[in-house]
Amino acid sequence: MKTERLKRTSLGDRLGMLLSLGIMVITFSILNPNYFQFSNLLNILESAALMGLVAVGESFLIIAGHVDLSPGSVSAFSGVLVAILLKSGLGALPSLLIVVLAGVVIGWINSLLVNGIHLEPFIATLATMSVFRGLAYIINNGRPQQIFDPLYLMFGAKLVFGLPIPVWALVIAILIFTVILAKTRFGRNVYIVGGNATAARLAGIAPKKVLTKLYMICSGLTALGGALLAARMNSGNPSASQGLEFDAVTAAILGGIAFSGGVGTLGGTLLGILVLQGFNNGLLLMNVPEFWQYVARGVLLIIALSFDYVRSLKRK
């Protein structure tokens, strides 16, 4: 009975998100006809790619009862690092691979702080958020590093079957990790760890190993997104991606991921990504001042957490 109720709740959440997405698109299209133009919709998708990649990783972590606050800094660090590697003469693909591997190592460091030193995830990743933002400024003396490699710049500008490469990266990531979450033992273990870590240990699951992999996945996807953002912006900027982690968490919770862990799907996260990025884009087109955009996104996060609380009551 409880499983059936959870399924109905999940379906209701998705229908609600689809309705919200439709209302949002109609409203912004009425307020600004440019909103529904193909070029702007393409821009929404491309802008959603970085936040979406992070949201995929955050979704896994939140389902497992954890969260990572460092993605904004890791993204900026990755962009600067890839720009410096390219400047040194390293090719486009090797540079991208090294940056993604660096992201995986950062995730391992986060997991070590949480699993090894037993810091709370908020505290551990808040610390690394500060560390890697600082390193992003230090390694290039606080200045953006221009990218001139034509092959690498194609990652941010080239269209493949009508869509930018970063969007394809997000699509592929969602497809792969949806299968992992829904169809593999590892995916089931993620839900079990998030639902009850003690029960997971008694069932023979090693929660620390699961969490180590999740932190590495999250930071690896973040590094990929940051490197692709640098290709799109033609530079690695140490001040880039401010607040990225909060947008990603908001998208995940809007999509039905339970902040308390153990519940959610990447299909819901995808809807959350589209709603949040469409909302951000609409605010830009309406020329809403930047400071008020911060307020609006904060209010949206509060609304998402409030809905999550209501959903948690329904699950009991």
Image (spheres, grey):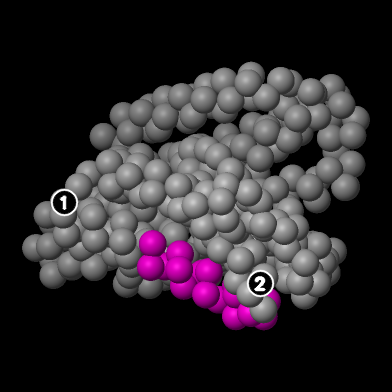
Which segment is the magenta one? 90-106
Does 85 appear above or below 71? Answer: below
What's under tag 2, amino acid-wise?
Answer: Leu
Quarter of the image for the C terminus: give it.
Answer: top left
Residue at horizontal 31%, vertical 56%? Answer: 110
Residue at image position (19%, 58%) is 115
Q: Which residue is mark 1?
A: 118
- C-beta proximity under 8 Å, tags 1 and 2: no
Residue sitting nearer the eye, 86 or 301: 86
Look at the numbered disc 1 and give the secondary structure of its residue: loop
Q: Which SS class for mark 2? A: helix
**Residue 15 position in % (x across, y down):** 58, 39
Where is residue 20, by image quadrant? top right
Q: Residue at 84% across / 43% down in the picture?
A: 40
Judged left or right of residue 310, residue 203 is left
Residue 268, position as x, y percentages in the image: 52, 47
In the image, residue 297 sits, relative to residue 173, either above or below, namely: above
Count residues near mark 1 (Cα–Cα under 10 Å), then give few for <14, some for 14-19, many for 20+: few
Q: Quadrant of the N terminus?
A: top left
- The magenta stretch spans residue 102: yes
Q: Nearer the viewer, residue 83 or 272?
A: 83
Residue 19 quadrant: top right
Residue denoted by label 2: 86
